[in-house]
Image (cartoon, grey):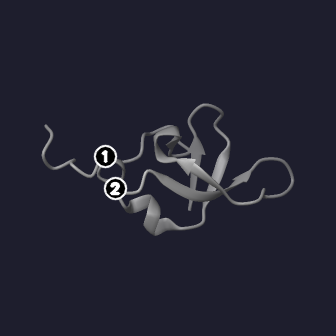
Amino acid sequence: MFVAETSTGHLIEVLDAQSLFDPHKSQIQGSLHYGEEAQDPEMYDKSDLSFPSGEALPRCWTDPDYRRKP
């Protein structure tokens, strides 16, 4: 699965999808796809990521209290 860095639009391949879906984790491990080769895995803050279309990640993936807030 790919997400994008909000500030640059560069694609990041999510290496652990479970951490992306877990609202209790604020970071994911991913590999930047920029240039000819994928880069070494790094940790990325979920708050800095979006879908490649520009749409924000679902709140249930980023906020552990999403059910309590309006």
Residue 35: % across, % down = 84, 48
Q: Is 59 placed left or right of 68 in the picture?
A: right
Residue 34: % across, % down = 78, 47
Helix, strand or loop under label 2:
loop
**Total number of numbered discs in the rendering:** 2
Q: Is 12 placed left or right of 20 in the picture?
A: right
Residue drawn at x 21%, y 47% as measured from the top left: 66
Q: Give the foreground label among 2 and 1.
A: 2
Going by the numbered disc 1, the residue's amino acid type is: Arg
Task: Tell me which numbered mark, 2 or 1, is placed earlier along the sequence.
Answer: 2
Residue of label 2: 23
Position of 3 relative to 22 (above/below): above
Displayed quadrant of residue 37:
bottom right
Give the class, few, some or many, for how many residues have Cα within 10 Å of label 2's Cα (few <14, many ≥20). some
Separation of residues labelled 2 and 1 (CA atoms): 8 Å
Residue drawn at x 49%, y 66% as measured from the top left: 17
Residue of label 1: 59
Residue drawn at x 30%, y 47% as measured from the top left: 63
Residue 58: % across, % down = 35, 48
Instruction: In the displayed orientation, state which residue is furthest to the right.
Output: 36
Q: Is 42 placed left or right of 39 in the picture?
A: left
Position of 7 relative to 26 (above/below): above
Give the class, few, some or many, for how many residues have Cα within 10 Å of label 1's Cα (few <14, many ≥20). few
Residue 6: % across, % down = 56, 35
Marks 1 and 2: in contact by CB < 8 Å? Answer: no
Helix, strand or loop under label 1:
helix
* Viewer-proximal residue among 58 and 62: 62
Going by the numbered disc 2, the residue's amino acid type is: Pro
